[in-house]
Amino acid sequence: MLEDTSFAIHPGKEKIIENTDYRDIGNLVQKHFEHGVLTAHSETGELKVLFYRDDIVRFVMNPFGQASLKSSPALIKEPESVDVTFTETNSLIVLESKLLKVEINKEPLRVTIFDQEGRLIVREGKKGMGYKPSKEVICYKEMGEKDHFYGFGEKTGFLDKRGEKMTMWNSDVYAPHNPETDALYQSIPFFITLRDGKAHGIFFDNTFKSTFDLRTEEEYYSFMAEGGQIDYYLFAGPSMKEVLEQYTTLTGRIPIPPKWAIGYHQSRYSYETEQEVREIANTFLEKGIPLDVIYLDIHYMDGYRVFTFDQNRFPNPKQLVKDLKEKGIRVVPIVDPGVKEDPEYDVYQEGVKGDHFCKYIEGNIYFGDVWPGNSAFPDFTSEKVRKWWGEKHKFYSDLGIDGIWNDMNEPAVFNETKTMDVKVMHENDGDPKTHRELHNLYGLLMGNATYNGMKQHLQGKRPFLLTRSGFSGVQRYAAVWTGDNRSFWEHLQMSLPMVMNLGLSGIPFAGSDVGGFAHDSNGELLARWTQVGAFTPYFRNHSALGFARQEPWSFGEKYEKVIKKYIQLRYKWLPQLYTLFAEAHRTGTPIMRPLVMEYPNDANTYNLSDQFMIGDNVVIAPIVHPFVTHRVVYLPAGRWVDYWTGKILEGNQHHLIQAELDVLPIYVKEGTMIALGAVKQNTNEKDETLTLHLYKSELSTYQFTLYDDDGLSFDYEKGNYLRKIIKVTCQEKEVHLEIKDEGNFKPDWRTLELIVHHGESDINVYVNGKRLSDIKSNTDLPTYVIEQN
């Protein structure tokens, strides 16, 4: 039969997809199922389908030839052995795991996926997979009226991305970000769809410039790329948390950061001299404002040469780092990828001699203009180069530095395209590819080199890495900030859904520049932004030269007092936040969450962009407009306790609340618990007492987990941690705690106390069946000692 020959892919058989210039992949011609992998040939190319787990299935379609199962560096997991059944009818091929059912229609070739209860997850209808002769590839899916879309990494605009069209192409964007700014620094081609309270996810593992179109058509959305294959993973959910667990199983999760990395960070472009850095540090100490990190931007270097210090500005960096560390303050320097073209500069010499720089196919090094002037760029797609770059960081670790800040790593170049010539070739560990294909991987692979190099040099201590650019999987190495924002109220507003969607994209350690990077901030804006920053996973104040300074004291005593209060509050909440970081490491669940994650059946949460949750039981509702002291707060099901006043508010309602400048509205769900410590100058100071705050209800059960470890080493990977699992049962006049400990770690805090909010004076509290006695404390609330070390 002609279908068994090359005639099957005759170009004359192409079918144009309606209302586009794309060609459909056509009908199924032949198929083969072996070892759990379906290989199906359409009229134009080849499709492979395989399960990675019972709840994860991969589809790879190459319209131009054989489908390759080689993955991008985003992936760290091989497929598990999954029991897949194969059945066939005249019109359908059906693949089933324990949790998913994949139906492949033969004429035309279309994919539909159900769960085993028959719930439709995704379907291709009149449109499916297609391509252009110019090698662009596209995949269409039906879009229902009730579909809501989240994730997509670092994108401006509101929380729900339905109605948006978004590009993945890592870009240096200094011009003011606004809702139509696209693309930005990160490319995370992953999203979650929520429909009728059930979620599923799709990860499009294609490194070319890609576009997700949820705007152009009412009945379909699409994802396309300028080259490569249609290669995507379907995650079955059915909850948003389960989708993230599935996605991060493939792409990795954050290591638990060192405790100092989740404290308060102070930065400026730039603190230009050693004397200025010391003065900044001393002012924080004198004013009693907590601080864990000071950043060094590009002016610390000798002519912007990486791995150098300017000897005039910073005559003794090792002593500076030592002196500050003794005060509990770390120094984090910036490291850009551009290496100055200078034949007398040892890093450039090594790069040329070792063949470490990006080159054209003809063999000549690519040079681009960045801060040092004409510069070469390491080819991080090569393992040899990544190892060399990581080894160079001994320069910093030998100075006592534990953290690095990667910037300009899109890579940014000062030219019309803002980046490297797309014709540059990358070695790619023996599989050469153009920069056009691998551009979006540059920041991820630089992060790999930097993090692993620092990890080796620190000999058991956890490194901290901050990156501006990345791809899926960047969470394995780095925290992410949202780049060059501005001191506009609109940018404060925009930062909330941006950071929430980064969390929903597998990147929980994220934040924005508090106060805004460019433009002039003011006292009210900095105070309100610091309130948000206190509960954002990554908490850094950063500003640019030529604009108003915005250290906490920059706008006078009135604002300094408020800003100090919320930086101190950050440190009080560190035990709770650290527990959530550990949960993100274990499960992929973000620290800062949109309300829709916890309340997926509540339509009021679907596009709620100016509130967020910390964990599963705390709602933060910041003021994000100038001269405003009132706002509407939506509280979902349950009863909620005002953190400041103890007032109880009913859920499933909107409330008009008042919040003067020194008040950040915080609500804790009744029947739940949080863990707080004491105010401290930095994380070098240890809590002697940790306090569990129970917001008692009449009848409820709640499970709370408190996590702790040494905060510095990787010993937690060997079981040296404490996970205290507390089941709380509230009755009318009784509270029962069932506590079980996991791990071998003995915490620094000597005493664990319990404070019961809204508990009657004659309440009885039991821990593992033993009744506790109320103790005298500084609060009028019933207080109990649970245990002492």
Image: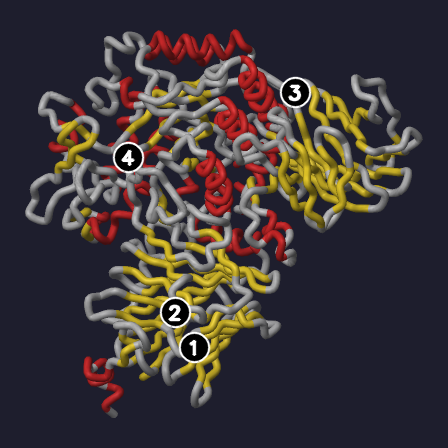
Instruction: Say whether marks 3 and 1 touch (CB < 8 Å).
Output: no
- Which residue occupies 26% across, 72% down? 21
In this figure, which residue is indicated by the disc labeled 1?
Answer: 125
Checking the image for residue 678, the label placed there is: 3
- For label 3, the crowd category at 10 Å Cα-Cα, with few meaning under 14, some 14 to 19 and many 20 or more, is some
- For label 2, the crowd category at 10 Å Cα-Cα, with few meaning under 14, some 14 to 19 and many 20 or more, is many
Pick whichever of labels 2 and 1 is earlier in the sequence.
1
Q: Secondary structure at mark 1?
A: loop
In the picture shown, does residue 415 fall above or below 777? Answer: below
Pick whichever of labels 1 and 4 is earlier in the sequence.
1
Residue 201 x %, y %: 49, 59
Q: Quadrant of the C terminus?
A: top right
Gap between marks 3 and 2, in whole Å? 53 Å
Q: Secondary structure at mark 2?
A: strand
Gap between marks 1 and 4, in whole Å? 42 Å
Q: Secondary structure at mark 3?
A: loop
Task: Say whether residue 317 is visible.
Answer: yes
In the picture shown, does residue 100 fall above or below 300? Answer: below
Q: Secondary structure at mark 4?
A: loop
Q: Amino acid at mark 3?
A: Ala
Gap between marks 3 and 1, in whole Å? 58 Å
Pick whichever of labels 2 and 4 is earlier in the sequence.
2
Instruction: Say whether marks 2 and 4 touch (CB < 8 Å).
Output: no
- Which residue occupies 33% across, 83% down? 27
Q: Amino acid at mark 4?
A: Met
